[in-house]
Image (tube, helix red, strand yellow):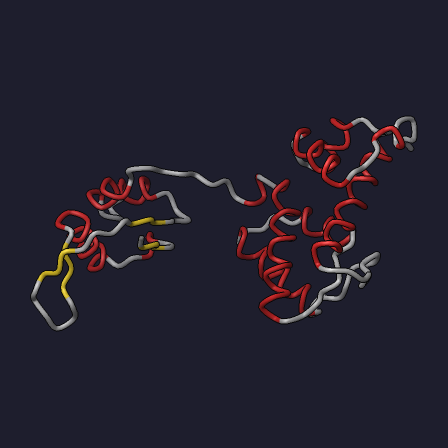
């Protein structure tokens, strides 16, 4: 499998060569004219609308239709903010391993900051922000501490704080808490179960 990212930036010359690979399933080594049969799957990603580019003559229409066998449209990060805590936790684990550090778990103010951003750079921008947080390039937000335990334990504590705060504000009404956290109701139910949170302790406690 060959993954081609930002294929909308491919030059016209390379588009012709890629089209030949897709049509004939052959390639040629640099400096050789001997065709080599290949059996590969092409996965391409684009930040632009390839159909619109092909209609405008800025991307080969024949290549577009060759590539457009199965199309997955991924909404921008700003349209699926419920994914941010999950992605941030994943990137925190990756960054901790990559940089050999034990970062503090982000507090609620830090997550609120991430949830409040528009993320024009999408997931890559979030990953870079998490990297900076891990390396201490950005100051820890108020309420961010370096409590002990593994990174997974710290992230769980951080998530518990967020969920409990939302449940406290909503007097234990899960749908209201889910709306405040910008996540689906079922997702919140699953997290309440996983974290072992007692809903009865929050009923009637709204501010």
Residue appearing at x 19%, y 49% in the figure = 22
Could you tell whether 199 is left or right of 27 in the image? right
Q: Relative to the observer, which residue lies in front, 112 or 101?
A: 101
User: Taking 148 as reference, is 188 above or below it?
Assistant: above
Residue appearing at x 39%, y 47% in the figure = 48
Could you tell whether 146 is left or right of 183 in the image? right
Q: At which x and y percent is residue 53? A: 31, 45
User: Taking 63 as reference, is 15 above or below it?
Assistant: below
Residue appearing at x 67%, y 65% in the figure = 134
Q: Relative to the observer, which residue lies in front, 179 or 191?
A: 191
Counting every numbered tag in the picture gives 0
Q: At which x and y percent is residue 136? A: 71, 69
Q: At which x and y percent is residue 6? A: 37, 54
Instruction: State the residue lying farthest toward the left.
Output: 33
Could you tell whether 201 is left or right of 30 in the image? right
Q: At which x and y percent is residue 166? A: 80, 37
Identify the image quadrant of residue 110.
bottom right
Quarter holding the C terminus?
A: top right
Identify the image quadrant of residue 172.
top right
User: Taking 45 as reference, is 142 above or below it?
Assistant: below
Q: Relative to the observer, which residue lies in front, 197 or 12?
A: 197
């Amino acid at each position: 499998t060959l993954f081609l990212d930002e294929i909308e930036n491919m030059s016209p010359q390379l588009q012709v060569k890629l089209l030949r690979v897709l049509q004939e399933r052959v390639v040629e080594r640099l400096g050789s004219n001997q065709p080599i049969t290949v059996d590969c799957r092409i996965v391409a990603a684009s930040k632009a609308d390839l159909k619109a580019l092909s209609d405008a003559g800025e991307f080969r229409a024949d290549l577009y239709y060759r590539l457009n066998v199965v199309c997955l449209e991924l909404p921008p990060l700003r349209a699926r903010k419920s994914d941010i805590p999950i992605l941030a936790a994943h990137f925190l684990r990756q960054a901790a391993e990559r940089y050999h550090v034990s970062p503090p778990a982000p507090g609620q103010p830090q997550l609120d900051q991430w949830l409040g951003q528009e993320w024009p750079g999408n997931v890559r921008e979030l990953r870079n922000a998490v990297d900076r947080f891990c390396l201490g390039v950005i100051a820890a937000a108020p309420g961010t501490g370096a409590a002990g335990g593994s990174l997974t334990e710290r992230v769980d504590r951080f998530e518990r704080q967020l969920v409990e705060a939302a449940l406290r504000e909503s007097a234990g009404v899960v749908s209201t808490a889910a709306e405040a956290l910008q996540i689906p109701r079922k997702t919140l139910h699953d997290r309440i179960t996983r974290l072992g949170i007692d809903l009865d302790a929050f009923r009637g406690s709204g501010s």
